[in-house]
Structures are given as structure tokens and as C-alpha cells.
Image (cartoon, rainbow, N blue to C red):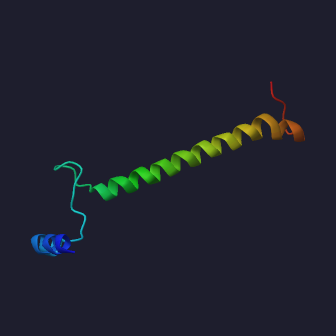
């Protein structure tokens, strides 16, 4: 508890706020960068899943129902 109080008295109003930037000239904090990475990773997985579903539909489901033939 002593370390937290010392940090709070040193930082003052900035205590508990995320002000650490990735680079000094880039106005993006580390928390924002982590959120960006999680959302883009989630989007990439969604794209992979959609691509697999489309491939299975085109390759197997469509020809099985006679919608088209695979050449």
C-alpha cells in the first residue's frame, strides 16, 4: 500500500490514467494499441472462418444439392 500511495502523491491527477505512449510522436497509448491488436485478430479469425464456410459451400454443399457442378 505504501508504493501505491507514493505513486499517487508523485503523479497527482495523472494517477490511474493511461498516458504511456508507444512512441513520443505517435498519439496512441499502449492500451489503445492492445485494443487494436485484439480487434484486428478477432477480425482476421472471422475472415478465416468465413472463407472456410464459403469454400465448403462452393466445393461440397452446392454440388450436393445440384446448384452447380465443380469443374
Residue that protrudes farthest toward the front in the picture: 2
Indicate left or right for 40 with 64 as reference: left
Tell me the quadrant of the picture where the C terminus can be found.
top right
Indicate left or right for 70 with 38 as reference: right
Nearest the eye: 15 or 29: 15
Residue that protrudes farthest toward the top in the picture: 71
Nearest the eye: 9 or 60: 9
- Give the answer, above or below, for where 7 lies relative to 48: below
Horizontal and vertical percent position of residue 42: 51, 51
Nearest the eye: 2 or 61: 2
Q: Quadrant of residue 8?
A: bottom left
Horizontal and vertical percent position of residue 19: 21, 62
Horizontal and vertical percent position of residue 70: 81, 28
Indicate left or right for 18 with 49 as reference: left
Q: Which residue is pictured at 67% across the width and 40% down the height?
A: 52
Horizontal and vertical percent position of residue 26: 21, 50
Number of numbered discs on residues: 0
Amino acid at each position: 500500500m505504501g508504493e501505491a500511495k507514493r505513486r499517487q502523491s508523485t503523479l497527482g491527477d495523472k494517477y490511474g490514467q493511461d498516458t504511456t505512449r508507444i512512441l513520443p510522436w505517435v498519439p496512441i497509448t499502449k492500451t489503445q494499441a492492445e485494443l487494436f491488436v485484439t480487434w484486428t485478430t478477432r477480425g482476421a479469425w472471422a475472415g478465416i472462418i468465413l472463407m472456410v464456410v464459403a469454400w465448403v459451400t462452393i466445393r461440397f454443399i452446392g454440388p450436393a444439392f445440384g446448384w452447380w457442378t465443380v469443374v
